[in-house]
Image (spheres, grey):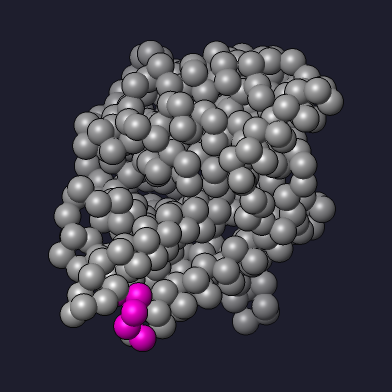
Amino acid sequence: MAGVDFGGGGLGLLRLASTLAYAHTLGMQPRYFFETEEHAAIRASARRFALAQLRDHGAAWEEAEAFPIELYAQAAQAGIAGIGYPEALGGQGGDLSHLLVAADELIMSGQTVGTVVGLGSHGIALPPIVKFGSPAQQAQFVTPCLRDGRIAALAVTEPDGGSDVAALRTRAERDGEYYVVNGSKTFITSGTRADFVTTAVRTGGPGHGGVSLLVIERGTPGFTVARKLKKTGWWASDTAELHFDDCRVPVANRIGAENAAFAMIMMNFANERLMLAVQCVAIAQLAYDEALTYSRNRQAFGKSLSGFQVTRHRLADMASRLAAARALTSEAVMRQTRGEQIFALAAMTKNTATDMCSFVCDAAVQLFGGYGYMRETLVERLYRDARLYPIGGGTREIMNEVIAKSLGY
């Protein structure tokens, strides 16, 4: 695997030792069963980046509903953007497990979910190009994101489609060496600022067999950002509705074969769902830590809140559910990196982690009382951020359908 103190080039034994020494100095401990020394080095570098670039600004960026666009380039230059991507394409090497550890640490140390989510939107936009794209497409789209901080987004969801990917209606008609695209996408993370959008379109007949992926670049005539959407949480990440009106996209921008993208999208979803699970574990850990500290320090009726049995039992429930979700996430990631088919397990993991996160964040707000309802507290923001997870990346109900089908009923 390439360097993880980043800034280019291979890590090497001396740099690995240095990064690990930094991790030990910080007293960092692995949070997942699968973590090795490489993961520890990545976690240390992600923490260094988060403390230097995110921690002091995250709350202000949330209120401003945007983070500086220069942060993409800074993440690329630090090597953060390239974790989990092949070195030949400008990445740092590694696999999904390395990427997930970095995301976990960025949220834990940076304490800003919206910024981390926006900064990592290439994590769902690039994998189809990495896996199924041509060398020319990889050089044109993947490498500039990993090395220079170009911004990528994924556009699948439509205003009247929701989780039903096979029913998408954005149409791409072949016209010589171009596709003419008409339709709309919505809830697109980084959609207002993306340099290009990996877009699911219908090139064939109805159902899953008529879907293709096109890379549509910013500035293409007919491609417009209709509006920036206002959200309950994740304020620092921009979310957009996109319109395509006779938008001419080169056939050369199609990823893989025509009408063959449904399977690519499903494979992408499995990894995305593990990413969402990891984010939930990190968010819940932050909320739990905040609630534990507050319960020890807050005085009521002559003793700390943690002196009351009801508080201790609530904290015990929070810690237990958090540990269970982390364990299931660890198993799912280990199975994925071994090459197992994990569609159902990824759905189970996402549902378990999102349920846990919602419970823990709600309990944290309750323990904080009135202060937990105030925008000045971290737990209030985490509570809002957590609400997206049972919806995004496939709703809880869709996950249950995936699970049920895998079990044969």
Q: Which residue is rendered at x = 80% and y = 52% of the image?
A: 339
Task: Look at the picture and state if 175 lies above or below 169.
Answer: above
Q: Report if residue 243 lies within the magenta region.
A: no
Quadrant of image for the C terminus: bottom right
Task: Look at the picture and state if 353 lies above or below 45.
Answer: below
Where in the figure is residue 114, as x and y percent of width and height? 37, 40
Which region is colored magenta?
Answer: 305-309
Image-quadrant location for residue 53: top left
Task: Look at the picture and state if 251 lies above or below 375.
Answer: above
Direction from residue 94 to residue 118 in the image, left or right? left
* Residue 61 visible within the image: yes
* Residue 189 visible within the image: no
Pick the residue in front: 74 or 234. Answer: 74
Pick the residue in front: 13 or 392. Answer: 13
Q: Which residue is rendered at x = 67% and y = 78% of the image?
A: 407
Quadrant of image for the N terminus: top right
Where in the figure is residue 156, as x and y percent of width and height? 46, 42
Image-quadrant location for residue 81: top right
Where in the figure is residue 103, as x and y percent of width and height? 55, 42
Direction from residue 176 to residue 135 in the image, left or right? right
Q: Which residue is rendered at x = 21% and y = 37% of the image?
A: 63
